Image: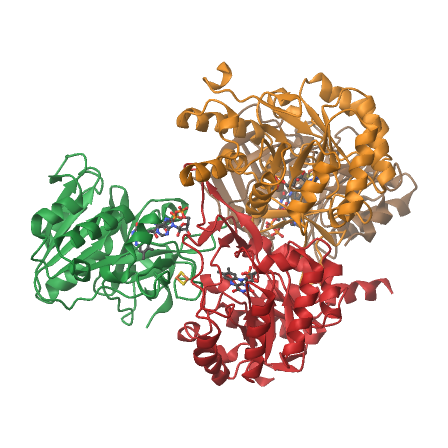
Chain colours: A brown, B orange, C red, D green
């Protein structure tokens, strides 16, 4: 059950442009991979919470990975032991883990957050998975790639060629395994999701049904009441669903990719 | 009432008994169902539903929300399932919760308002209607009525003629002659006034020169507009004799008490629900604690106190 | 202009040459003298003076200011030394600084507005007038004109008939039919529009049930109202062809650029002066740096870009 | 000359309900007793500065005494070494030091701030002075009374009788020296100033001319441009002057005490 928690930050690990904030959480905080927490990010006239995917769930702790993107995330990234966070969660519909065949996880930038948690869970459940993680340059997330490589089969794609595959995460993913994966899980910038969806559709008409994406949309409430986080869906035509409560994870064939592409 | 330690929070407006003066604002509480995962909505004074239109409405293209200093913009665009599903799914559910319900009615033409209002009234399980003639986020209907007093009057009398439950009219902060407008609504038959709706507002990303909202403009809500709402309630309370539900940036019990003191009979909490889905109940508790501390026994003692206090002092 | 690294910040509106598009708002900059201890006011695009009334005006009883979330209330009540001393002491001083001056004119009757306007125009050293028909803090005059379009029209034509310098009309956010009102002002002779004035607003101390301001109600300014100002400029820019000076919660260069992009030809910085008396010059520098970074060479390229950008995209 | 400074807090001393914040200031920061600084008090939607009297000026430092009165002062009181303050100052018209005869300083609560600085300056200049400081109870300002007693002749008045004179600072002051003082300097709550002015007027018609008070009025700009800090003055009748630039120190006979009393 989602609830409001005031959690103590018990650790912070800085990874380049992002920081992992480890918080003490009670046992009843049971996130599913792909779910998020809605975090109050300080005062300064900021009245809305910010959504962050669950990055990890350990013994008595859970963590988020915060990339600085603006004032709220910048405030959050600077928290550390001694601070408390006001969070709502876990929220939203996470990834569907049931699938036949291999799993391919495609992350763009901080989109690694929910996919890392997913990968851990999949491995715990005895599944195999392959992670393609794209970023601008190899140093962007500090030592995080090395940390994650110890946990799972993580391959990097760097746009500037400074490490791993030289190019995008989508290119890398398609090279690695575009036909055999039973399920492709993705999280990243909208452009990345658009290009991935297009490539999946190229493969075969059912490609989008094998895709699950976690979308980023601006949110107010995070709990399904404001309709602020509208995502264009295929059915009924012209309709929207709520990223926060119907998502943030959608099956590729649930979304209206044409209208997704038209959004700025 | 014992639940609040000797303080009686009950309020009766337009013949509707509220167990306390705290409602949830239209559009910030869904139709109650999602919020019931977070709180016991039966403990509210009342719920004002998300706007209901005749036909299902997909709403505006995203992005639909943007944060501003101590406020937020929204341009949801009246997304809702339409009258039929509202009457089937949402209104009965709310009714079963035993909480008074103000159904927020919107339309793109006057005829649509009237039809939605008539059907809701016919269902016999809504406490009242709230005519949303102040939504800044639709091209037709909505705010258009707030700019034209005589059209608004015609709308209110048409709706009144079609229903047998109380009709509240929700005012926009973009109203020129506020007192005149409020008075005209009451003369046209309004049983109560609610205010304020969001303020027309806008933000642009200077890096791209693009508006932050898919709808280009939106409505401002939250603490930023609270002082505006207080002033408007103060002004309208001097003009009309019907009940007033005050809303706009209420961010805790203190803002709610302030609203009562300038003349609101009840208050509604909006954007704060997004920051804290249990906030409404905190406001109820806070009002009760304030009343206990100050020795007030009934909510009515607070209503209009800022004016009565002064005239008392002068007299 | 070399001073700003290849970027030309000059703007010409109503035949008045401004070296940059950043003015100081009326009432937030005194008449320049105090501020000149903090900055070189000659580097401003222009100064809009504190309201001038025919007779000296003591203003409202204190308290006159109160802070609200991301905003402030004021009810100064047009405190000023009156026309005579203004013409003797302040206007010549400002003129000597060589900075364009908009003289903000207020009155308690239409005749007073006209007389002040006539005398200022006669002095031959003011660049323009700004008719303050939107001050929420006086019982007569002020906002009263904003609620009545035809009275406002008569006032504008009477003033125009009495002066030979450009007349700007300052609009209130409490205007119902904004486009209609702005259009009517231009047809009545307004050479330009400035907006927005403060929003009528109020705060009450719940511990004492007393309003926070001596005048009971006041005007809200600051970042809280910025999105409202942006929307109003956007709307008025679609209606009128005369120059627009945009103001309201500008809290840095970004907000100023935003105002230009929705259609303002120049901007004015108000409440921010209280937080940082050198802020106006920071806004000028910030605009220049933005233009350099983005490759804009003239301010005019920014004006209305949010609309032009879109129509460009659509066309 | 007043200016805007970003000053480093180099020390904080807690004195009960108030804290002294010691800041590093450049040499050109030359406050006169009774002048104030206008301090930015954090974010959280607080856009206005808060005025605080200069409490001390030492070698390369200046300090203010902050009593928690609301959210801004509460934020300020919690600053300490490592923080920086954004201040404007020194602002306003301070006390007129020139006078014949003894000096009596009458402080109410945190009104001690400008008078402490004044007393130090008077003593430095070889003048004598007597300070009557009123508070609710003797413990309210921690050890600050003891600290100040080492510097000057400070007598306490406690409303609850817990120390010094049992009663108000005004009562104490009038007992101490109501006729001989060449100049009476006062700072404190409006009620205290009103009662002091009334008592001074009782003594003789010129009593108010021997009184200098520092008034507290809500401020926006602090520099004389907004006219927000209006103080009712005697001449011309009905007029106001600006606490921030014409004051905060006024001679007793400059003010319109009838209208002062009518303010809430
Ligand atoms: C379901 C979900 C999960 C997310 N998980 C993560 C994560 O694990 N790690 C991470 O670093 N980021 C994540 N994000 C993005 C993160 O929420 C934004 O970076 C953050 O809200 C930016 O806030 P700001 O105040 O720093 O930026 P500002 O640009 O100042 O924010 C202004 C407003 O826009 C919203 N906003 C801005 N950027 C985004 C965005 N990309 N997505 C949604 N809203 C945005 C803010 O919430 C705020 O309301 C997630 C977003 C969503 C929707
Ligand atoms: C010239 C001058 C010198 C001062 N010197 C000192 C000092 O040395 N030490 C000290 O502790 N206090 C001093 N004060 C009072 C101090 O400025 C207020 O306590 C402080 O502004 C309260 O702010 P807040 O945010 O905590 O309170 P809030 O009540 O939240 O403030 C809301 C608004 O009211 C204003 N305000 C509230 N109380 C006062 C007040 N008493 N006087 C003026 N404005 C007020 C605030 O500045 C703010 O704009 C002085 C005031 C003035 C005018
Ligand atoms: C996201 C959102 C949706 C809203 N939808 C409606 C609506 O459907 N009908 C309506 O009358 N008001 C609507 N409002 C306005 C609120 O009911 C309320 O009048 C306004 O937000 C001011 O209160 P607040 O500042 O407490 O939010 C909406 C407000 C928000 C923020
Ligand atoms: C203290 C104060 C005094 C003002 N006095 C005047 C005035 O005399 N005439 C006028 O037209 N506007 C006056 N205004 C309004 C401002 O010029 C400006 O329109 C408004 O404050 C919005 O801008 P801002 O949010 O940047 O302050 C005053 C505003 C403030 C805060
Ligand atoms: S953020 Fe409110 S419905 Fe999704
Ligand atoms: S505070 Fe602005 S004039 Fe004094």
Taking the spot 64% from the left edge, 60% from the top edge, the residue there is C145
When asked about the image quadrant of residue D24, the answer is bottom left
Quadrant of the image containing the C terminus of chain A: bottom right
Q: Residue at x 15, y 69 (%)?
A: D98
Q: Is residue B88 above or below residue D70?
A: above
Q: Is residue A158 visible?
A: yes
Asked which quadrant contains residue D164, the reply is: top left
* Ligand 3 image position (quadrant): top right
Where residue C75 appears, x then y in whole percent?
48, 55
| Horizontal side, residue D246 vs residue C149: left or right | left
- Give x and y (percent) for residue B195: 64, 40
Report whether residue B53 is seen. Answer: no
Q: Name the spot of residue C132 as percent of width and height, x first.
A: 59, 65
Work out whether C290 lies above or below D165. Answer: below
In-front residue for pair A158/D246: D246
Q: Please say if B12 is above or below C45.
A: above
Q: Which residue is pictured at 61% across the width and 53% down the height?
A: A69
- At which x and y percent is residue A169? 74, 51
The extreme top residue here reads B2
In this figure, what is the number of numbered marks?
A: 0
| Residue A240 sits above or below residue B126 on the image | below
- Position of C75 compared to D26: left or right? right
- Res C123 quadrant in image: bottom right
Q: Residue furthest right?
A: A205
Q: Nearer the viewer, residue C83 or D156?
A: C83
The residue nearer to you, when weighing A39 against A117, is: A39
Quarter containing the N terminus of chain A: top right
């Amino acid at each position: 059950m989602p609830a409001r928690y005031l959690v103590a930050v018990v650790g912070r690990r800085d990874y380049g442009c992002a920081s992992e904030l480890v918080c003490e959480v009670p046992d009843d905080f049971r996130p599913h991979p792909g779910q998020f927490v809605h975090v109050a990010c300080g005062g300064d006239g900021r009245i809305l919470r910010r959504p962050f995917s669950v990055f990890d769930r350990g013994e008595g702790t859970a963590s988020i990975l915060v990339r600085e993107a603006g004032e709220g995330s910048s405030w959050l990234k600077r928290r550390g032991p001694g601070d408390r966070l006001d969070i709502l969660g876990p929220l939203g519909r996470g990834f569907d883990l049931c699938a036949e065949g291999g799993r391919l996880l495609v992350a763009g930038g901080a989109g690694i957050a929910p996919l890392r948690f997913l990968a851990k869970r999949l491995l715990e459940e005895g599944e195999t998975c392959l992670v393609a993680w794209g970023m601008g340059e190899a140093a962007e997330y500090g030592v995080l790639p090395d940390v994650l490589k110890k946990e799972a089969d993580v391959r990097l794609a760097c746009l500037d060629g400074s490490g791993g595959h030289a190019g995008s995460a989508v290119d890398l993913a398609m090279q690695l395994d575009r036909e055999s994966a039973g399920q492709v899980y993705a999280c990243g910038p909208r452009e990345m999701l658009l290009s991935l969806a297009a490539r999946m559709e190229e493969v075969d008409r059912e490609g989008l049904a094998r895709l699950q994406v976690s979308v980023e949309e601006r949110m107010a409430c995070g709990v399904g009441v404001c309709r602020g986080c509208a995502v264009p869906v295929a059915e009924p035509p012209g309709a929207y669903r709520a990223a926060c409560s119907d998502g943030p994870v959608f099956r590729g064939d649930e979304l209206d990719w044409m209208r997704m592409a038209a959004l700025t | 009432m014992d639940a609040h330690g000797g303080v009686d929070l009950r309020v009766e407006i337009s013949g509707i008994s509220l167990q306390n003066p705290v409602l949830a604002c239209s559009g910030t509480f869904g139709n109650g169902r999602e919020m019931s995962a977070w709180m016991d909505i039966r403990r509210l004074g009342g719920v004002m539903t998300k706007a209901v239109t005749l036909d299902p409405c997909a709403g505006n293209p995203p992005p639909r929300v943007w944060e501003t200093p101590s406020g937020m913009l929204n341009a949801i665009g009246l997304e809702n399932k339409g009258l039929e599903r509202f009457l089937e799914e949402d209104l009965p559910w709310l009714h079963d919760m035993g909480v008074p319900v103000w159904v927020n009615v919107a339309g793109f033409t006057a005829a649509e308002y009237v039809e939605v209002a008539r059907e809701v009234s016919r269902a016999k399980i809504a406490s009242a209607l709230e005519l949303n003639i102040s939504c800044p986020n639709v091209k037709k209907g909505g705010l258009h009525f707030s700019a034209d007093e005589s059209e608004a009057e015609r709308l209110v009398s048409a709706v009144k003629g079609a229903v047998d439950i109380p009709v509240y009219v929700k005012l926009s902060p973009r109203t020129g002659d506020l007192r005149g407008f409020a008075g005209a609504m009451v003369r046209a038959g309004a049983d109560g006034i609610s205010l304020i709706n969001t303020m027309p507002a806008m933000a642009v990303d200077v890096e791209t020169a693009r508006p932050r909202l898919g709808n280009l403009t939106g409505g401002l809500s939250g603490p930023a507009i609270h002082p505006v709402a207080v002033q408007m309630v103060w002004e309208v309370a001097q003009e009309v004799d019907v009940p007033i539900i005050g809303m706009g940036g209420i961010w805790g019990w203190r803002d709610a008490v302030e609203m009562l003191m300038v003349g609101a009979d009840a208050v509604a909490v909006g954007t704060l629900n997004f920051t804290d889905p249990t906030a409404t109940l905190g406001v109820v508790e806070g009002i009760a604690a304030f009343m206990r501390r100050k020795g007030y026994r009934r909510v009515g003692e607070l209503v209009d106190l800022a004016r009565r206090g002064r005239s008392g002092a002068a007299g």
